[in-house]
Amino acid sequence: MDVSRRGFLKLSGLSIAALASGLGFDPTIAEAKGFVLKLEGSKKIPSICHFCSGGCGMLLYVKEGKLIHLEGDPDHPTNEGALCPKAASLLSVAYSPNRVTKPRRRAPGSDHWEEISWEDALNRVAQKTKEVREATWKANDEIINAKTGQRDLLSVNRAEGIAFLGSAEVDNEESYLISKFCRIIGTPYNEHQARI
Ligand code: SF4
């Protein structure tokens, strides 16, 4: 008998199921029970995947402060329970030993990164932003009339040296805050990676 790989897998599955039911044991029930036991005592938290702007709904199961399982939210209108591979791997990402959880700095000329405190990191970012803003501030810009050739100096007041590049991981609320921040510090250069 010629059996394809797919056919072989099907036949083996059927044989196992037949053997299991012959022994009075339903493997699907055991599997479901194991799953329920795994989630016992956990808290189910509805959330949104942060990986891209798709905004798929997820259900996170947290036990003793640790994420133990996640799945697509079947009631979410965007993904109706499905998750793409990126989101499905989030559990591994969350606890990966390679994940950087503290700010780091590589000093000029250095060949390695050093951990620094959050306070140091935020102070440095604030200080550098201020320096760049002051050094590149443009109060006026010359406008040339295309028809007459007349030159006029107009007040523009913008920070020429600062730009923001949004990411697909930026959610609505973060985008709102970034846009506000751009206006506060005076930069018109606020773009998104998807448009580049
Ligand atoms: S990364 Fe995948 S699961 Fe997450 S929002 Fe995008 S499409 Fe949805």
Image (tube, helix red, strand yellow):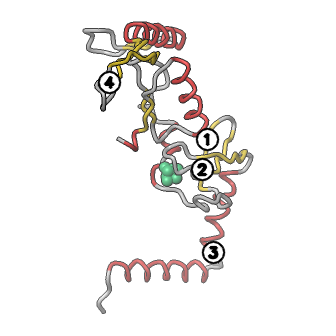
Quarter of the image for residue 105 reads top left
| Amino acid at pointer 3 | Asp
Q: Considering only order in the chain, which callout, 4 or 3, is on the residue closer to the N terminus? A: 3
How much space separates mark 3 and mark 1, taking CA atoms?
29 Å
How much space separates mark 3 and mark 4, taking CA atoms?
81 Å
Query: What label sits on residue 143 in the rendered view?
Result: none
Does residue 177 sit above or below 90 in this rendering? Answer: above
Residue 94 locus on image (x, y percent): 52, 37
Q: Secondary structure at mark 3?
A: loop
Which residue is tagged 4? 144
161 on left or right of 34: left
- Which quadrant of the figure contains the N terminus? bottom left
Quarter of the image for residue 76 reads bottom right
How much space separates mark 1 and mark 2, taking CA atoms?
8 Å
Depth order, front residue of 81/137:
137
166 on left or right of 32: left
Whether label 2 touches label 4, CB < 8 Å: no
| Amino acid at pointer 4 | Ile
